[in-house]
Image: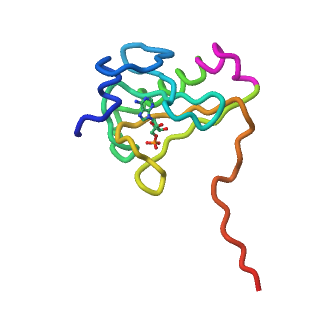
Amino acid sequence: MSETIFTKIINKSIPADILYEDDEALAFSDINPQAPVHFLVIPKKPIATLNDLHSDDKALIGHLYWVASHLAKQMGFAAQGYRAVMNCNEDGGQTVYHIHLHILAGKAMGWPPYQAQLKTL
Ligand code: AMP
């Protein structure tokens, strides 16, 4: 897998607003926030897309969600709620090919993300 901007953030060769770090994961603020709170939780292991997960990555993916919920409680928006989403490939809207969990909070999120266009006569 070729190196992405997230590898540079993990290696600290470019700056980021780091919210959490351990041996396996890193969380940092999204540079282009789409909600009052928007941060990313990434594995330090470079995995390009959800399609590239191996069975031995299952615990790592669970860990990313744990980090998200830990930060949600610490930052005070856990009870109010939030969106946790991973985009995959082109139709999913993925632009950085190092898997990442988006955490969006601080406003009510719309759902569903897509509505079929209604046919009008
Ligand atoms: P996605 O489109 O799901 O691949 O999401 C990639 C996310 O990474 C976008 O929300 C970007 O704003 C964010 N992003 C890209 N570069 C940086 C960076 N240097 N620091 C923080 N977030 C970034």
Residue 97 found in image quarter: top left
Q: In this rendering, would 88 be left or right of 66?
A: left
Q: In this rendering, would 97 be left or right of 2?
A: right
Q: Residue at x 64, y 53 (%)?
A: 113
Q: In this rendering, would 108 be left or right of 8?
A: right
Q: Viewer-proximal residue, 109 or 81?
A: 109
Q: What is the number of callouts on the image?
A: 0
Q: Dividing the image into 4 quarters, which one contains the N terminus?
A: top left
Q: In terms of image quarters, where does ligand 1 lie? A: top left
Q: Position of residue 78 (x, y in %)?
A: 69, 23
Q: Dividing the image into 4 quarters, which one contains the C terminus?
A: bottom right
Q: Is residue 74 magenta?
A: yes
Q: Viewer-proximal residue, 68 or 30?
A: 30
Q: Viewer-proximal residue, 31 or 89?
A: 31
Q: Is residue 65 above or below residue 17?
A: below
Q: Position of residue 102 (x, y in %)?
A: 53, 35
Q: Position of residue 87 (x, y in %)?
A: 48, 45
Q: Residue at x 40, y 37 (%)?
A: 99
Q: Is residue 32 magenta?
A: no
Q: Which residues are magenta?
A: 71-79
Q: How is the image coloured?
A: rainbow
Q: Residue at x 32, y 36 (%)?
A: 47
Furthest toward the bottom, the residue is: 121
Q: Residue at x 75, y 38 (%)?
A: 108
